[in-house]
Image (tube, rainbow, N blue to C red):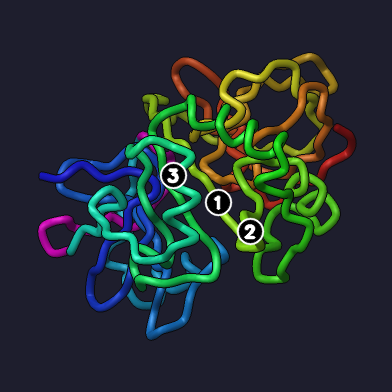
Amino acid sequence: MNKVVEGYFLKYKNVIWSVKGCYHPDGYAVALPRLVDGIKIKRLNDALEIVRSKFSNLLKYVDEIGFSVPLVPLNESEILDPFNFKIFDNKLREFLSFFDREVGITGSYLYLGKGNDMDLLSFKPEHYHMLEELRKKGITRPLLTVEDSEIETLDYSSFKLLKSKRVLEGTFEGQGYTFKIVQCEEFGQVREIKEFDGHIRIAKLIKPFTLPVKYLAINDSGKEYILTSFRIRFTELSPNTIMYIKGKILVREKFDDLDLDIAEVVKLKSS
């Protein structure tokens, strides 16, 4: 059976599904609807509502995730492989020329064959340093605009500030790009879920630019948590960043996982 991870897409029941995360039970992919009846679904909550209303039979509890998620059967799906794709767009080809051949094409270029933004997938952490060089040389520029459809979890000002600092997102010759670098690891099973409501400070950068990102965080009482996320919006956070978080702690065997992807509110205080 083909192995799929974050950045891959599936076609199942005439819907395009976006594969999420690194853990997928044998024969299935944890995935969310991205394109339904020609409409692109960007917000996590909107995607989950579609699953609940149209594909509730796919929802299954997964110990390694800690809650019910849609499990799309791979043997009934067409797998859209980012690394098996022909490139016809000249600007995309030019951008890829700065990297080696081990970069995949994901997003709308993969499932539609065209797009407004270039979405790229890599498994090589060293590609991040090339992105830093491209930004230093002015070949790429920061993203300074925010669309309403992007705003979720983070408030507008926090979202815009973090977005402008990232090199994993930016523009190349006027066209936006997003560069996902996936470096999977096993988190283990979730033993318990607790509520969290308070401030944390990022004390150490563990994996700040490869997905899933990991940061060592400390709350006001000195208790330590590991912040995790598979979303680009939470990459490249700076040491000593202070954030208000209202969300959930996934208590795992080895660490307390303060998962930013399922948080209700994340608000930047300082960075």
265 vs 176, nearest the viewer: 176
Residue at left 44%, top 62%?
A: 90
Report the front residue among 69 and 8.
8
Expressed as whole percent of the image width and height from the top left, the position of residue 63 reads: 35, 36
Which callout, 1 or 3, points at the residue further toward the start of the chain?
Answer: 3
Q: Amino acid at mark 3?
A: Ser
What residue do we see at 21% from left, 58% from top?
79
Which secondary structure lies at badge 2?
loop
Measured Cα–Cα span from mark 3 to mark 2: 14 Å
User: Image height check: is 259 above or below 147?
Assistant: above
For marks 2 and 1 on the same chain, the one whose residue lies earlier in the sequence: 2
Marker disc for residue 173: 2
Residue 52 appears in the figure: no
Residue 157 vs residue 188, the one in the foreground? 157
Q: Is residue 215 magenta?
A: no
Describe residue 232's horizontal placement relative to residue 165 as left or right.
left
Q: Closer to the N terminus: mark 3 or mark 2?
A: 3
Question: Rounded to the nearest whole Å, what is the CA distance between mark 1 and mark 3?
Answer: 16 Å
Task: Identify the image quadrant of residue 58.
Answer: bottom left
Q: Is residue 165 visible?
A: yes
Q: Which residues are magenta?
A: 64-77
Q: Which residue is mark 3?
A: 97
Between marks 2 and 1 in the image, the one whose residue lies nearer the viewer? 2
What's the residue type where badge 2 is placed? Glu
Is 233 placed above or below 199 here? below
Q: What mark, if any, has residue 178 been given in the picture?
A: 1
